[in-house]
Image (cartoon, rainbow, N blue to C red):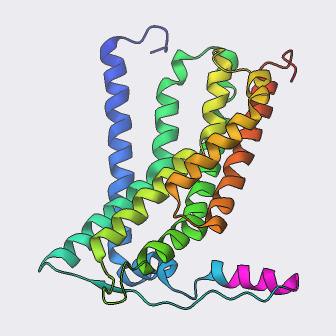
Amino acid sequence: MSEEMMTFGGHLEVLRRMMFRILAVTVALAVLVFCFKETTFSMLFAPSNSEFVTYRAIERLCAAVGVQFHFTPYNVDFINTELSSQFMTHLTTSVYLALLGASPYIMVELFRFITPALYDDERRYSIVIAVAVFSLFILGVLMSYYVLFPFAFRFLGTYQVDARVVNHINLDSYITTFTTLTFLMGVVFQIPVITFFLAKIGIVESDTMAHYRRHAMVLIALVAAVITPPDVLTLVLVTIPMYALYEASIIIARRVHPAVKT
């Protein structure tokens, strides 16, 4: 049946099949993650280590420019307070990571679902958009894993109001914070894709975005300050790529409407 002649029931059938594919991929990934417990949690706990690769890379970079800088070693213990909590955390973590891993696929499936409603010239962008969504999502995940979360954990996990109060981080709290921040950064990195669609329908224009560069810089810095711990280095490391995404969005909006000059 052609897309133009598809009935309401036909659209529901397409939606049902799409949901089934998404569910099948997510369940398969969840089972895979669950089976590799040691590898999974070794990866998840790596950013909580004071010897994490990001810290060592920054120290080597400082040494390369003649600056002697070393992060202070720290140790934070994890605790479990309920009988079934570790098993349930293992189970829910497998689902969280499966959803995280399947998110690009889910986005592509949703895009394919709405593609028939687009014009022919817009459909040509489908492959490019799918690749962009996946690539940007992965960049957001890597940004969270290697930059945002390690520094957030380092600050919050070692912060003390008094030396007599020792931090013991609940396992569930750690996993929830990790997955939430990682997913949010994956979504934030979709800004260029969102800009593309907004520019297509005429809501945003490149000259307007370029005109408000300074305002955007301030807003991005404020957002970065909210989602990061009160640490200057972390703030800078998060602000720079977010502003780079804004500049990329201006270029994208300009390509959508090349007649508009900044």
The furthest residue to the top: 5
- Give me the residue at 29% from left, 76% from top: 171
Label the magenta part by its dominant secondary structure.
helix
For the question of whether residue 221 can be seen, the reply is yes
Residue 241 highlighted magenta (yes or no): no
Which of the 4 image quarters holds residue 106?
top left
Can you give x and y, in whole percent of width and height, for residue 196 in the image? 67, 28
Residue 168 vs residue 171, the one in the foreground: 168
Can you give x and y, in whole percent of width and height, for residue 101 in the image? 46, 57
- Give me the residue at 50% from left, 77% from top: 154
Q: Where's the N terminus, which quadrant? A: top left
- Give me the residue at 52% from left, 19% from top: 116
Q: Where's the C terminus, which quadrant? A: top right
For the question of whether residue 101 can be seen, the reply is no
Q: Which residues are magenta?
A: 56-66
- Give me the residue at 51% from left, 67% from top: 149
Can you give x and y, in whole percent of width and height, for residue 18 in the image? 38, 36
